[in-house]
Structure formats: C-alpha cells, structure tokens
Image (cartoon, rainbow, N blue to C red):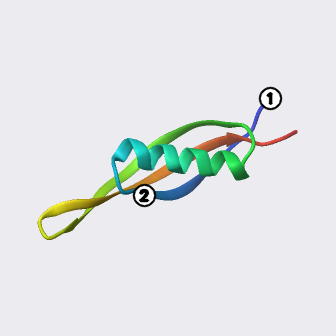
Amino acid sequence: MSVARITTLSANSKTSFDAAVKEGIDRANMTLRNVTGAWVKEQKVEIKDGAVVAWHVVLEVTFILDD
C-alpha cells in the first residue's frame, strides 16, 4: 500500500504558463522523491505597461512517501 502527500508550490516564468509549470515540476523533482503528478490550482499574469511580463502558477504536487 502506498501513501501519498500533496504539497503546494508557486512558480513563475518570463515566457509562458507552460514554462512556469515546467519550472515548478523541475524544482519539485530536485527536492522530492517519487513525484507522480501535479494539478495547476491557480494561474495569473503580471502586466506592465499593458503587456504581459510574467506568468505565475500555483501547483499542487503529489508524491509517494517512502516506506
């Protein structure tokens, strides 16, 4: 039997939502073992002078705890 845990991460990118998600997952994999999935809980953009300058995501990352 496996037990999973969910943790919340925030990540951002200067290029896109996809890049922000990848940044968050890459960082999670550096610290957590057995990452099995993620849910994009929130998305927002930062706007400066009428243009989008940053993309932000909040992720719920699921990982399996070691036995």
Question: Circles 1 and 2: CB distance less than 8 Å?
Answer: no
Placement of 32 over or under 44, stated as above or below: above
- Badge nearest the viewer, 1 or 2: 2
Placement of 43 over or under 25, stated as above or below: below
Query: Given the image, on which type of amino acid does mark 2 rest?
Result: Asn
Quarter in which the N terminus is drawn: top right
User: Residue 48: image x %, image y %?
Assistant: 19, 70
The numbered mark, 1 or 2, whose residue comes first in the sequence reads 1
In this view, the residue farthest toward the top is: 1
Q: In this view, does 15 lie to the left or right of 12?
A: left
Q: Residue at x 73, y 37 (%)?
A: 34
Question: Which numbered dot is residue 12?
Answer: 2
Placement of 28 over or under 49, stated as above or below: above
Q: Mark 1 points at which residue?
A: 1
In this view, the residue farthest toward the bottom is: 49
In this view, the residue farthest toward the right is: 67
Label 1 CA crowd tier, 10 Å (few <14, some 14–19, many 20+): few
The answer to whether residue 6 of the structure is visible from this angle is no
Quarter of the image holding residue 45? Answer: bottom left
Label 2 CA crowd tier, 10 Å (few <14, some 14–19, many 20+): many
Question: Which numbered dot is residue 25?
Answer: none
Question: Front-most of 60 and 23?
Answer: 23
Question: Front-most of 2 and 21?
Answer: 21
CA gap, disc 1 and disc 2: 35 Å
User: Residue 59: image x %, image y %?
Assistant: 48, 50
Quarter of the image holding residue 29? Answer: top right
Q: Residue at x 36, y 53 (%)?
A: 42
Quarter of the image holding residue 64? Answer: top right
Q: Which element carries disc 1, helix, strand or loop?
A: loop
